Image: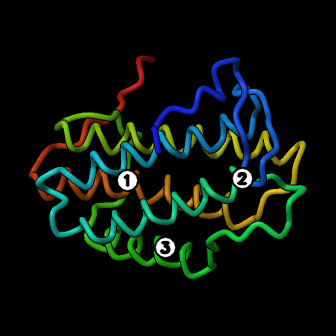
């Protein structure tokens, strides 16, 4: 089978279930942003500082594939089999956040992304996650979306923020605080 099908050459693509939609459709934007986020999660997983977290991050990537499949599904085709997202997946992130926060200094100021490439990659992933979340909310205005999708993305962006702080601590990088000009 060839990688190219030429069926999208006129700006349309197929949802799982066969329905054709414009590539500019909010559903395509939502799962395309999830795909972009997953690529950044792979970049994070590949950072030396994250070697011991690689399996954890890979699990997140698996859940993002699940979310992508959920969003790529034609909502009118209810019998299409797809993987499921569970409440435990959200709790998995919450547990990791709590563990990391336990060893971090409480925040006193807003933080600016940066200080080290690995910290910056984490913040890029966080902002892409927030964009994915906004796309899913926009999709929810026109089509039902499983509420766990939004919960997972919201918690994932929190996880990524705290992960950036944890990485800075592990690398002994001073966090860059925002000092507003007043």
Q: Nearer the viewer, mark 1 or mark 2?
A: 2
Does label 1 or label 2 sit earlier along the sequence?
A: 2
Determine the image quadrant of residue 43: top left
Local SS, label 2: loop
63 left or right, relative to 108: right
Determine the image quadrant of residue 104: bottom left
Q: Residue at x 83, y 48 (%)?
A: 140
Point out the image quarter for the C terminus: top left
Q: Nearer the viewer, mark 2 or mark 3?
A: 2
* Disc 2 to disc 3, C-alpha distance: 31 Å
Say which mark, if any, is on residue 94: 3
Say which mark, if any, is on residue 107: 1
Local SS, label 1: loop
Residue carrying label 2: 16
Residue 41 on image: x %, y % = 36, 50
Residue 111 on image: x %, y % = 36, 39
Q: Do callouts 1 and 2 mark residues in contact (Cβ within 8 Å)?
A: no
Say if 109 sits above or below 71 in the image: above
* Disc 1 to disc 2, C-alpha distance: 44 Å
64 left or right, relative to 150: left
Classed neighbour count for the residue bearing mark 1: other residues with Cα under 10 Å, few (<14), some (14–19), many (≥20): few
Residue 42 on image: x %, y % = 31, 50
Residue 156 on image: x %, y % = 50, 58
* Disc 3 to disc 1, C-alpha distance: 18 Å
């Amino acid at each position: 089978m060839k990688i190219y099908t030429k069926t999208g050459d006129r700006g349309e693509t197929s949802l799982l279930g066969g329905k054709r939609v414009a590539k500019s459709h909010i559903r395509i934007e939502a799962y395309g942003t999830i795909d972009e986020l997953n690529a950044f999660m792979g970049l994070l997983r590949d950072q030396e500082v994250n070697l011991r977290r690689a399996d954890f991050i890979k699990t997140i990537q698996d859940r993002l594939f699940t979310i992508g499949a959920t969003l790529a599904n034609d909502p009118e085709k209810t019998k299409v089999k797809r993987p499921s997202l569970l409440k435990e997946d959200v709790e998995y992130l919450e547990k990791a956040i709590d563990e990391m926060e336990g060893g971090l200094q409480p925040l006193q100021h807003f933080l600016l992304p940066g200080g080290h490439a690995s910290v910056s990659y984490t913040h890029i992933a966080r902002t892409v996650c927030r964009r994915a979340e906004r796309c899913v909310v926009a999709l929810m205005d026109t089509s039902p979306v499983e509420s766990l999708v939004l919960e997972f993305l919201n918690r994932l962006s929190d996880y990524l923020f705290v992960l950036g702080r944890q990485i800075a601590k592990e690398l002994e990088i001073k966090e860059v605080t925002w000092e507003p000009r007043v």
